[in-house]
Image (tube, rainbow, N blue to C red):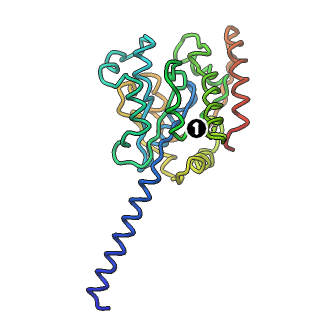
């Protein structure tokens, strides 16, 4: 075999290997949904996934629809409603079957579970790889009260909805979906993220541990106050327990949240 024949053979082998790689990437497209209640570090976790070169992150796909139907007067409400799709059916079509933006192979979607309103059929959820993020209710509630300065309810926290969705996914798939605890994540991010990546079928990368400051995404709501900690972060901060006591008027909701948390906690990746 002369030099020219060797070059041609090498190029052919290279092309076939490259084609195989492309086909493998196409077969391994991942659509990951992370479900959480407010103030559970879901945005910091979103930043972690956004730092991967193979991942496109979608922050709160159902948020514009929720703003439309709830009447909630969040900052930038009109701007959000004018800029984003508000039809939940079209939103679902994008997150389940639409092209993954930017040519990425992983489509990571962060959801506040309470925005999955009762009128929204949940069958589309089963097309995604569903994961669940939990946090100690005391710490979640204290963070919620401090930020929003208003009374949390089971509906605005959404923890009962989180449990219902977890059970629905488990029943539909026949397996226990991945659950991660916020404290575990902060105490050992490399270990927990490695377990999570393995559970959803992607390789862990050190890129998930560090990122630059700035808005988590280009979304309009990313500039508002509840994203301040995530905006200023460059990685997972060290876990520090909250020492404050829950105000007496929230003890009932804390008790109910603890019941759900304890049930999901036993399934956590560890």
In the rendered image, the quadrant that contains the C terminus is: top right
Quarter where residue 65 is shown: top left
Residue sitting at the far bottom? 1
* Residue behind mark 1: 131
Residue sitting nearer the eye, 76 or 9:
9
**Residue 157 percent location from the top left of the image:** 58, 19
Residue visible at 63% across and 32% down in the picture: 166
Residue visible at 54% across and 21% down in the picture: 114
Residue 205 sits above or below residue 82 on the image: below
Quarter where residue 192 is shown: top right
Residue sitting at the far left? 4
In the rendered image, the quadrant that contains the N terminus is: bottom left
**Residue 137 percent location from the top left of the image:** 66, 24
Q: With 213 as the anchor, is 197 left or right in this view? A: right
Residue 28 sits above or below residue 252 on the image: below
For mark 1, give the secondary structure: strand
Residue sitting nearer the eye, 138 or 79:
79
**Residue 90 percent location from the top left of the image:** 37, 28
Residue visible at 65% across and 27% down in the picture: 163
**Residue 45 percent location from the top left of the image:** 52, 38
Residue visible at 56% across and 47% down in the picture: 200
| Marker count (numbered) | 1
Neighbour class for label 1 at 10 Å: few (<14), some, many (≥20)? Answer: many
């Amino acid at each position: 075999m002369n030099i020219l024949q060797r070059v041609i053979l090498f190029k052919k082998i290279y092309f076939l290997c490259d084609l195989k790689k492309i086909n493998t990437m196409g077969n391994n497209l991942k659509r990951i949904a992370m479900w959480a209640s407010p103030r559970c570090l879901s945005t910091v976790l979103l930043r972690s996934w956004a730092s991967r070169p193979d991942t496109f992150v979608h922050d709160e796909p159902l948020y514009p629809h929720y703003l439309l139907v709830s009447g909630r007067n969040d900052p930038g409400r009109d701007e959000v409603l004018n800029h984003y799709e508000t039809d939940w059916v079209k939103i679902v079509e994008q997150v389940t079957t639409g092209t993954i933006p930017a040519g990425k192979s992983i489509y990571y979607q962060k959801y506040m579970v309470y925005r999955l309103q009762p009128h929204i059929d949940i069958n589309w959820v089963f097309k995604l790889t569903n994961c669940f993020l939990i946090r100690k209710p005391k710490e979640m509630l204290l963070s919620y009260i401090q930020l929003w300065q208003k009374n949390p309810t089971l509906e605005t926290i959404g923890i009962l909805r989180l449990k219902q969705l977890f059970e629905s996914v488990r029943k539909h798939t026949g397996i226990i979906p991945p659950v991660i605890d916020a404290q575990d994540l902060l105490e050992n991010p490399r270990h927990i993220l490695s377990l999570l990546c393995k559970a959803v079928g992607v390789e862990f990368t050190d890129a998930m541990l560090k990122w630059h400051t700035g808005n988590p995404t280009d979304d309009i709501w990313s500039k508002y106050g509840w994203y301040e900690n995530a905006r200023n972060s460059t990685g997972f901060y060290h876990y520090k327990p909250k020492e404050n006591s829950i105000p007496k008027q929230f003890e009932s909701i804390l008790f109910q949240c603890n019941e759900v948390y304890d049930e999901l906690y036993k399934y956590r990746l560890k």
